[in-house]
Image (cartoon, rainbow, N blue to C red):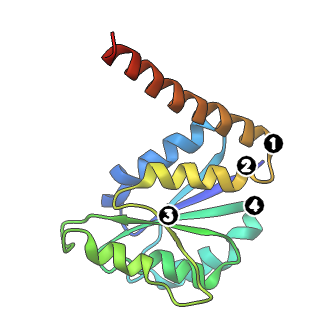
């Protein structure tokens, strides 16, 4: 069974990151959730990133606010794909510091980056990565996308009545 690791820099990031957890559970993908601070628990970060693949994790979603070093540091240490979620935190510069910290990675250390507070899309992207090699998950993603299409069609019908 596929598993996605979801980590965040502090408990205050949970309201944003819950969206990734919910969408992945909706796709029946197992999630492992933890708090891993790049600055306050660097040893835990190193252990988590270096060993995630040995615990069956296929993709890591890392949410962080402020300086937002967590996704990039994890990406530098793991062979797994990492999706960064910039989180608008109370000490943030309107979220831009988080976005740019995650987005501007050096060559060789990629982090897929979603929008500010975009944990829903991070969860969907993680499911799509899993779905590339898991036909059951792929089928669920196809159904999800068809549902999005139908919502638009139904909305258009209501407007045009």
Quickly name the residue at label 4.
56
In the figure, 80 relative to 123: above or below? Answer: below
Question: Of the residues under marks 4 and 1, which one precedes in the sequence?
Answer: 4
In the figure, 75 relative to 155: above or below? Answer: below
Quadrant into which the C terminus falls: top left
User: Is disc 2 in contact with disc 1, using a CB cutoff of under 8 Å?
Assistant: yes
Instruction: Specify whether 99 is left or right of 2.
Output: left
Rendered residue at 38%/22% (across/down): 155
Distance from the alpha carbon under mark 2 to that under mark 1: 6 Å
Instruction: Specify whether 11 is left or right of 103.
Output: left
Question: Of the residues under marks 4 and 3, which one precedes in the sequence?
Answer: 3
Distance from the alpha carbon under mark 4 to that under mark 1: 18 Å
SS for tag 1? helix
Tell me the mark number nearer the camera, choosing from 2 and 4: 2
* Label number found at residue 7: 3
Badge 3 crowding class, 10 Å Cα cut-off, few under 14, some 14 to 19, many 20 or more, is: many
Rendered residue at 69%/74% (across/down): 51
Question: Of the residues under marks 2 and 3, which one precedes in the sequence?
Answer: 3
In the figure, 41 relative to 95: above or below? Answer: below
Tell me the mark number nearer the camera, choosing from 4 and 1: 1
Rendered residue at 81%/42% (across/down): 135
Q: Nearer the viewer, residue 49 or 58?
A: 58
* Label number found at residue 131: 2
Residue 72's spot in the image, x, y percent? Answer: 50, 80
SS for tag 4? loop
All told, the count of numbered labels is 4
Quickly name the residue at label 1.
135
In the figure, 158 relative to 104: above or below? Answer: above
User: Is disc 2 in contact with disc 3, using a CB cutoff of under 8 Å?
Assistant: no
């Amino acid at each position: 069974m596929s598993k996605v690791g979801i980590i965040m820099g502090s408990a205050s990031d949970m309201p944003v990151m819950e969206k990734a957890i919910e969408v992945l559970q909706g796709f029946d993908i197992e999630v492992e959730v933890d708090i891993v601070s790049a600055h306050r628990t660097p040893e835990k970060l190193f252990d988590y990133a270096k060993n995630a693949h040995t615990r069956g994790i296929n993709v890591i979603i890392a949410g962080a606010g402020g300086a937002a070093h967590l996704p990039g540091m994890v990406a530098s240490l793991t062979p797994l794909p990492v999706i960064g979620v910039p989180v608008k935190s109370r000490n943030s510069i309107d979220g831009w510091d988080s976005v740019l910290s995650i987005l501007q990675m050096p060559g060789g250390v990629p982090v897929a980056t979603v929008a500010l507070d975009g944990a829903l899309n991070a969860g969907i992207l993680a499911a799509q990565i899993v779905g590339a090699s898991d036909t059951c998950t792929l089928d669920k993603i196809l159904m999800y996308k068809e549902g999005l299409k139908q919502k638009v069609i139904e909305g258009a019908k209501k407007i045009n009545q």
